[in-house]
Structures are given as structure tokens and as C-alpha cells.
Image: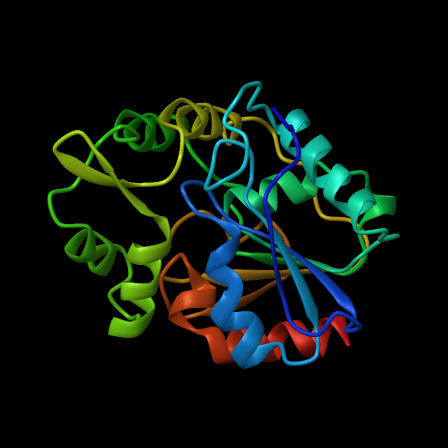
Amino acid sequence: MSDALTVHVFGPPDGPPLLALHGVTGHGGRYRALAEDHLAGYRVIAPDLRGHGHSPWLPPWTLEQHAADVLAVIERFGLEAPPMIAHSFGGVVALHLPRHRVGQLVLLDPAVSVRPQQALEYAENAAATASDPHAAQRGDWPAASEAVVAEEVAAHWVRVGDGWRPRYCPAAVITAWSEMCRPVPKPTGETLVVRALGADFVDPGFSATVDLDCGHVVYVDAPERVGALVTDFVG
């Protein structure tokens, strides 16, 4: 079995590369709308992290392994130090990459201030299923359009027993919540932190931030604003 991550690629083959990391329970395909509608001209390279989507589900699921997996993607695509956008747990993974392998870094509501009790509550729900995937996704993304919700359900939800769940390995997700309780390296170099005011994953003192009045999945709730922030910062 191949250990290589599944990678979604959007935009022109000759466009400047932009590596995009998703959060826990997510998948790289979520970046399609942002890439096509608000990052025109960029070649957005968005892997499914280990234990998520169509990538290998085998352990280990440590931050060190996730970082190694992302470095393998960078090498596979022949990149030097690409600019990156990274959401939630993906932001924690990005901060564990060797800094010289990353260009400008945009952290989208990174999960850098997760409290142990908060992590426990999320981890205990990792294996839960829903009877109606559309209603469950709509509950998570109240600001998204019906088309965006329907696309996510079609691409990422799978039948599990008598219910439905996004395509991820519960054990990998549980481990990810534990890993998010570890100390997080401070950003260095060119880093922009985008904080969602509707969530509590980024303490105000973490780093200089741009605050958006939206929910945690900022590139779904406020894609136009996120696209503008990324293009202005990355150049």
C-alpha cells in the first residue's frame, strides 16, 4: 500500500504554487471553491492529511508524521519553500514544519489554544454518526450556501453502519485532538494569523492577527475576504 497522501490540485499547471492544509475531520477538496473563485491564477495543492479523506489511514498520527507527510508532498511536486495556507489543525502541522521549507504562511484560525478539556470533548465525539448528513453539515456551516453544503456532503460523507460520518479515521481524529494539546511553536518569518471571532481556537496573545467575524472554517464562511487576505499577503 502506498504511503503517499492523496492530493487535490486546483488552478493552472503553470501558476505559482500555494500549498493548502485542511483541519481535523476535513479534506483537501474543501479548498476547491476558494481556489477557483478567489485565488485565481494560483496552483493550489491541497493534500488529504493522514487519516482523512482518501489518504492512508495507517498510524502514526503524530504531528511529526503529519509534518513528514507534508514534506513528502513538497518534494513530490518539486517545490522549494512554497507559500502556504493552513486551517485549524493544519495550522498546527504547518508550524511543525522546518521553517526553511515554508514561504509566506497564512494560518486560518489555527488550533493553537486548545484546552485539554475542550480536546477531550471533541475527541469523545470522533466516532459519532448522524442520521442526516446534510442537516449535520448545515449545522456545522450555517453561513454556507446550499450548493457548498451539498458539495461537501457528496464529496466527504460516507455511510457508517446505520448513520453517516465524514470520511476520516476516528482514531486519527482522536489522536489529533491530543496532539493539539502539545506546546505550539510560535510563528517565525512571514506569517499572517487570521482569527475567527466566532470560535475560540486562537488566544488574542498568540500573534498579530486579522480578526474576521465568522465561524471557525473561515474559508467557507468568508471566502472572498480570505482570498483577498491571502493574495495580498502572498503577492
Q: Is residue 181 above or below residue 52?
A: above
Q: Is residue 145 visible?
A: no
* Apparent side of residue 60 relative to residue 52 in the rendered image (left or right): right
Q: Position of residue 22 (x, y in %)?
A: 52, 50
Q: Position of residue 197 (x, y in %)?
A: 40, 62
Figure coloring: rainbow
Examine the image and state in which quarter residue 158 appears.
top left
* Apparent side of residue 65 relative to residue 102 in the rendered image (left or right): left
Which quadrant of the figure contains the N terminus? top right
| Viewer-side residue, 123 vs 42 | 42
* Apparent side of residue 47 relative to residue 167 in the rendered image (left or right): right
Q: Is residue 98 above or below residue 201?
A: above
Taking the spot 68% from the left edge, 34% from the top edge, the residue there is: 69
Taking the spot 75% from the left edge, 71% from the top edge, the residue there is: 234
Taking the spot 75% from the left edge, 69% from the top edge, the residue there is: 13
Give the farthest residue toward the front. Answer: 1
| Viewer-side residue, 113 vs 96 | 96
Taking the spot 27% from the left edge, 28% from the top edge, the residue there is: 127
Q: Is residue 11 above or below residue 115?
A: below
Examine the image and state in which quarter residue 67 appears.
top right
Q: Is residue 34 above or below residue 58?
A: below
* Apparent side of residue 189 relative to residue 55 in the rendered image (left or right): right
Q: Position of residue 103 (x, y in %)?
A: 81, 57
Q: Position of residue 88 (x, y in %)?
A: 50, 48
Q: Is residue 115 visible?
A: yes
Which quadrant of the figure contains the C terminus? bottom right
